[in-house]
Image (tube, rainbow, N blue to C red):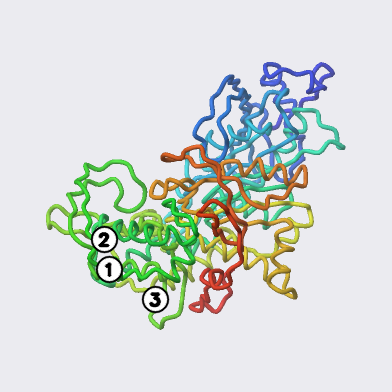
Amino acid sequence: MRMLFCLTASVASAAALTLDQLCTTSYAQSALPAEGFYQGITIDASSVVTTLTTNYSISSNTFFPDATISYCNISFAYTHNGRDDLVHVAYWVPDPSQFQNRFLATGGGGLAINSGSSTVSGGVSIGAVSGLTDGGFGNFNTQEDAHFLLANGTINWENVYMFGYQAIHEMTVLGKQLTKNLFSMQNGTKLYAYYQGCSEGGREGWSQMQRFDELDGASVGAPAFRFAHQQIQHLYSNVVEHTLGYYPPPCELQAIVNATIKFCDPLDGKTDGVVARSDLCKLQFNINSTIGTPYNCAASSGGGGFGPGAGAPTPAQNGTVSAQAVAVAQTIIGGLHDLQGRQGYFSYQPAASFVDAQTKYNNATGKWEVSISGLGGEFVTRYLELRNTSTLTSLEGVTYDTLVEWIYDLWQRYEDSFQTTWPDLKRFQSAGGKVIHYHGESDDSIPAASSVRYWESVRSIMYPGLGYNESASQLQDFYRLYLVPGAGHCGANSGQPNGGWPRTSMTQLIDWVENGVAPEMLNATVSLGANKGQNQKICMWPLRPLYGGNGTELQCVYDQESVDTWQYDLDAFKMPVY
């Protein structure tokens, strides 16, 4: 049973505490949320562990500036009454002298529900107690899919809902109360609660904003919501290659990307190696112009990389871009359509690399062949077929219609857990919440159009009686979207290294929430290449960047034709796709 402790007079004033005094097991136990605080949860006070760390260095963090911090890691376990489970949470607590009345909830990436130390450490740097959870999956390093099935054919639905939204919510509610107790915050003292996450962490953030009113603000990047569509999207490029019967060498596809970047780079009025107007690229670039472009890549011994085919040894690749390769690339960019021509989903923007289409070399045959995406494959084998395997071994018989059917089946099964596309944010808005949502325009894992579609869905659902400009303005009062020129998936893009990344979005969010300073443009910092350290600005959707003054004067302009390129009629489905 949970042990009860009372705050003593000697530690009642957190302002007088040092980090050493705070970071003791007895004090942490005394600050645990009281018995019955969260109905249905019992905290095991005997599980409390405290670990003091001083002069911890944060450097090259994608989402927070460099800093040196000291903190106390307080971890404990809890169970759900009537359920034989165990959930671990951990909270990094800043030095009392640095605490800024803030709490930060964090999420994970891929099929992980936390990001380890990377995000909670950044939270400490902004004066926040920062929390993470293991979701009840066994430990902080265990991913959700490890316990998704109880047996072949039997879903562990508690696992599904914990990963879908419940674990982050519980970690947030418990963490906010722990923070108030640790620092003896009285009822009249405001504790600002924030969230930060990208990719799966972005989806987890939206799972909280769509359901609860615990957060004052959230900074979310490239959210992996619309899970059914998103995960099957990873298989689309493979099915295109299989259907067209051509498996381009990676170097051939990269030559197409390079030619796209070269043509589309100056369309924003500034030639800097960054495609900031992928919408204009769609309108003006003829991908057939890349046919005949020479390519040459040295042999690789493999190792590293991300995505299908990454990390494997490859021979030298020489040749010219073929019409077959262009047909593959053009079909991929055009997005999934069923065999009747109805659109099922959209794809990556021009200038994004073709990671999902990366092929592998068969030394025995001397040919390039399909490398089935593990990201997409697992959602067919484990989450749809309910087999305890992540490997889809063949695409035989798989057509574009098959992909649409897989999306439909996954969507229907996990609508209330993984899909995370509820467009009515009235509860979050009414509670005064603010959200900064950003997405790399050249993201090659989650299409940038995914974020645009959700923003537009929220706009149309929440303000149905208003015109476009008025509804957009009202939505921007609490929800702002930014497309990051040239950026990749949740970070800078080595293929377009001169593009900035919004490393200080949390700082701008705090200024918006606590001081009412809404960010008209998002600050960005170049983290790669010769211009490393350069500051840039990012326009707020639906405005698009356009440079005047020989590429020196940034304007954020409204361009209806460009905005229209981001809109899709996903008519392969009768249900609305938010």
Q: Secondary structure at mark 2?
A: loop
| Towards the viewer: 478 or 244 | 478
Q: Nearer the viewer, residue 330 or 99?
A: 330
For marks 3 and 2, the one nearer the N-term is 2
Residue picked out by circle 1: 242
Of the image marks 2 and 1, the number of the one nearer the N terminus: 1
Q: Which mark is residue 401?
A: 3
Going by the numbered disc 3, the residue's amino acid type is Asp
Secondary structure under tag 3 reads helix
Residue farthest front in this picture: 549
Q: Identify which residue is drawn at 66% across, 32% down.
A: 44
- Indicate left or right for 442 with 456 as reference: left
For image coordinates 46% across by 50% down, the residue present is: 145
Q: Residue 198: image x %, image y %? A: 54, 48
One can see residue 576 in this view: yes
Q: Residue sitting at 44 percent across and 40 percent down?
A: 528
- Please name the residue shown 29% across and 58% down the image: 255
Task: Specify the quadrant of the image occupied by residue 266.
Answer: bottom left
Q: CA distance from mark 3 to mark 2?
A: 19 Å
Residue topped by disc 2: 370
